[in-house]
Each structure stands twice: as structure tokens, then as C-alpha cells.
Amino acid sequence: MYNTQSKRLKLIPLAHHQLLLSINDWSKFEQSLDLNPSTPLIDEAFKIEMSEAMNKYWLPNTLAYPELYHWYTNWQIVLKSTNSIIGTIGFGGYPDDYGSTSIGYMIFKDKQGNGFATEALSAMLDWGFGFSILKKVKADTQTSNKASQRVLLKTGFKYTHIEGSTLYYEVTKDRFTQSNVNLTH
């Protein structure tokens, strides 16, 4: 099974068949990954967003681009100490002609406030920026989501603009590499 790891976390990208299993039978899905059972405590807004992503993005794109599924899928964030899922993270597709893509993440409500989002985001950026094609990653969050704003800033993202109640950020490979040195030392 393919994954990338950080000190406390393991991130597992889901292939098309794994996405389908996660929809149809969560328990069998976790068993298929040799994980302990988890209880996903997710805000209703995120549940809706994830359902839309599953049906309109992850499933069709992992089917269309099976060799590049890592860029188009939902990655499970697994806490190594419990071997259970505590959230999700993923890129918004293979980098475009300018070397840019987006990223999103979510930590289960009962696991928030422990630095897991920062650690997972840092691990994903480290993985993504390991490919020469990736030059820039964009992210957005709601103005009310102060925790997510802190996570983005800690991992080297810089604020670019606001549209309505959405704040937009981006990080380049060089900026992330510099900020990652500060995160690990």
C-alpha cells in the first residue's frame, strides 16, 4: 500500500476501488487498509462538501487517470499511535501548465487542536513538491475558520486575497522549503 508519513501520521491515497468501498461499507474499507475502527466526527458542511467532491471529482478523476490517482483523490490521515483515521487531505488535481494545483484538508472534530492539520499539510506539500512539475499550491478557507488560517500560515502559505467570506492563500516550492525548515527545527 502506497503512503507518505510524518512523525505522528501516515497519509494513504485512495485508488478508485478504495473510494467506492469507503462509500459502500466504511468498516470493510478500514479493514481493507488494516486500520483500527474510527468514528468520523465531521461538521455537516464538510460532509456535504466531501460528498460533492466524491461524486464530482474523486471518483470520475481516479477512474479517468488511474496512473495519477494520487493527485486526484482523497488521502486518509491516519494517526500512527492508534492506527485509525483522523481526517482527510488531498490535492485538487495534477499540476496545470503553470505547475499549480490546490489542496484541501479536514481533521475530525474530536481530533482538532493537536497540530495534526499542520503536520498532515506539511507532509502532503513535502510529497507534492518532491515532483519537479509542482511549483505552487493554492488553498482557501472561510474568514470564520481561524484555525485553518493558522495552519496555512504555519506551513508557509501567504494570503493573496478575499472574495466574499473566502480567504485565498498560496505557497510556492521555495517558500514551503524555507518554512518547513522552521517547522522541523
Image: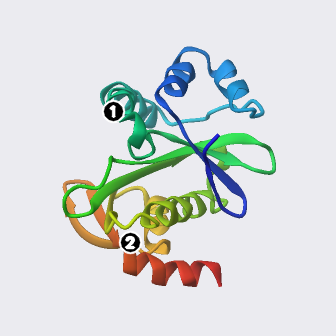
Give the mark count: 2
Indicate the quadrant where residue 49 lies: top left
Q: Position of residue 62 (x, y in %)?
A: 39, 32
Q: Quadrant of the N terminus?
A: top right
Residue 184: x and y, percent? 63, 79
The residue nearer to you, when weighing 44 against 32, is 32
Dot 1 corresponds to which residue? Answer: 61
Image quarter for residue 158?
Answer: bottom left
Task: Categorize mark 2 by other alpha carbons within 10 Å: few (<14), some (14-19), many (20+).
Answer: many
Residue 39 shows which numbered tag?
A: none
**Residue closer to the observer: 11 or 69:** 69
Specify how the rendered protein is coloured.
Answer: rainbow
Residue appearing at x 53%, y 77% in the figure: 180
For disc 2, the marked residue is 157
Furthest residue toward right: 81
| 25 to the left or right of 61 | right
Q: State which quadrant residue 9 falls in.
A: bottom right
Q: Residue at x 56, y 62 (%)?
A: 123
Residue 39 x, y percent position in the rendering: 68, 31
Q: Residues within 10 Å of mark 1 (few under 14, many from 20)?
A: some
Check disc 1 and give the amino acid type: Asn
Disc 1 element: helix
Task: Identify the amino acid type marked 2.
Answer: Phe
Q: Marks 1 and 2: which is nearer the front? A: 1
Q: Quick one: SS at disc 2?
A: loop
* Frontmost residue, 83 versus 140: 83
